[in-house]
Amino acid sequence: MHIGQALDLVSRYDSLRNPLTSLGDYLDPELISRCLAESGTVTLRKRRLPLEMMVWCIVGMALERKEPLHQIVNRLDIMLPGNRPFVAPSAVIQARQTHAGNPALYPQVKMVCQMELTSHLLTAAAFGTMKNSENELAEQLIEQTGDNTLTLMDKGYYSLGLLNGWSLAGEHRHWMIPLRKGAQYEELRKLGKGDHLVKLKTSPQARKKWPGLGNEVTARLLTVTRKGKVCHLLTSMTDAMRFPGGEMADLYSNRWEIELGYREIKQTMQLSRLTLRSKKPELVEQELWGVLLAYNLVRYQMIKMAEHLKGYWPNQLSFSESCGMVMRMLMTLQGASPGRIPELMRDLASMGQLVKLPTRRGRAFPRVVKERPWKYPTAPKKSQSVA
């Protein structure tokens, strides 16, 4: 059989089925259409690479960092059927630019994310330029935070206006953050050992920026000692009977889980590359959304795998192995009949035994700041001899 006949058969086979059916189990096509409609982006004419398919192209960019864009489109089978079975490389770039937003000055972006710790699912994200501070971006996450939650914040987000606005935005929206070094406070009463109810004064600048902020903020200060180091944690959970101080202080150690999530995105998905593929500002933001969406899709499948394992949480499974399984499944689905897709998805969910991680080891040595590597070798001292 000639190569032309083989490609013609592949093209005819693709024209008999809807390519979205092979990917719809991961991301609902109706959800994609609704998001495009809300963003004011629609397809006005029949394209070989419509906008709905380009969403999957952006997701594939995150899952296959080393593959060229046109190969991702061809391998994932996300183009409309036609006389030509493959798409030109330039067509992918042109199709991505139809999603473009407003122009920016520099192709650099600052991002703040919120993560659910047990599943590592990203629940919210906010983008901005390099001129925006992280506190400004964190303000955008207030509305996206649910009620009856506890948010563990990094010490860089210490702002009484932000923390007070976080608590007042909903019902039982609690927070916990390390106390800023040198912060002035007044002890109101003692709740237990290393547990005090304190009052902190706000600045005029903070009250001007946050109209609902009063002259004082009441919070709970927990003082704990970890490996010989004294830590002060500030939290909005002031009810000592309902929230025991020792248990609340132990919760903050789980904040490091989001750093592990960032490592999974940067090292596993992006292969430790310093930059993204995109060079235009609007495409950089678009690619970042694709990375976050792809990360959540893999994490969602890991939740399904953890349901088949007794006593295991999703964050106890290997992300790199699960990511490879999901990508191989996407390649497999394009050649499977629609009737076999549910069976293949159940098989994937039952493979959790293959991606279980061993128990996390404790730190064998204390944390140290590594010496920065030098570009050039160090010159030998005069007393040393050079062979």
Image (spheres, helix red, strand yellow):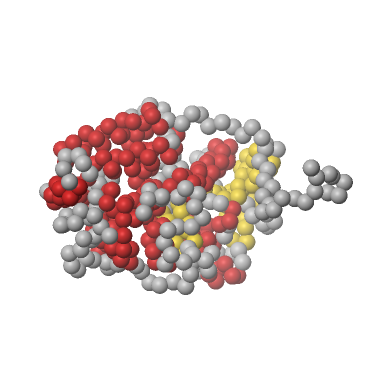
Which residue sits at x=17%, y=46%?
A: 2
Residue at horizontal 13%, vertical 49%? 12
Q: Nearer the viewer, residue 163 or 257?
A: 257
Q: What percent of the width, then of the height, locates residue 252?
A: 55, 43
Residue 346 visible, this orientation: yes
Taking the view exactly as shown, the residue that stands out farthest to the front is: 2
> On the rendered structure, is 199 left or right of 64?
right
Q: In this rendering, does residue 92 appear at all?
A: no
Image quadrant occupied by the C terminus: top right
Q: Quarter holding the N terminus?
A: top left
Query: In which quadrant of the rendered view does residue 218 lie?
Result: bottom right
| Farthest-out residue, right | 383
- Total numbered labels placed on residues in the image: 0
Please indicate whether residue 20 sits to the left or right of residue 113 in the image. left
11 and 266: which one is in front? 11
Horizontally, residue 369 falls left or right of residue 32, namely right
Q: Is residue 302 left or right of residue 241?
A: left
- In front: 269, or 356? 269
Closer to the camera in the image, 366 or 251: 366
Q: Position of residue 359 (x, y in %)?
A: 51, 29
Q: Residue at x 31, y 34 (%)?
A: 349
The percent coordinates of residue 81 (x first, y second) are 17, 55
Q: Is residue 323 above or below residue 72?
A: above
Q: Position of residue 309 (x, y in %)?
A: 37, 28
Q: Residue at x 66, y 35 (%)?
A: 365
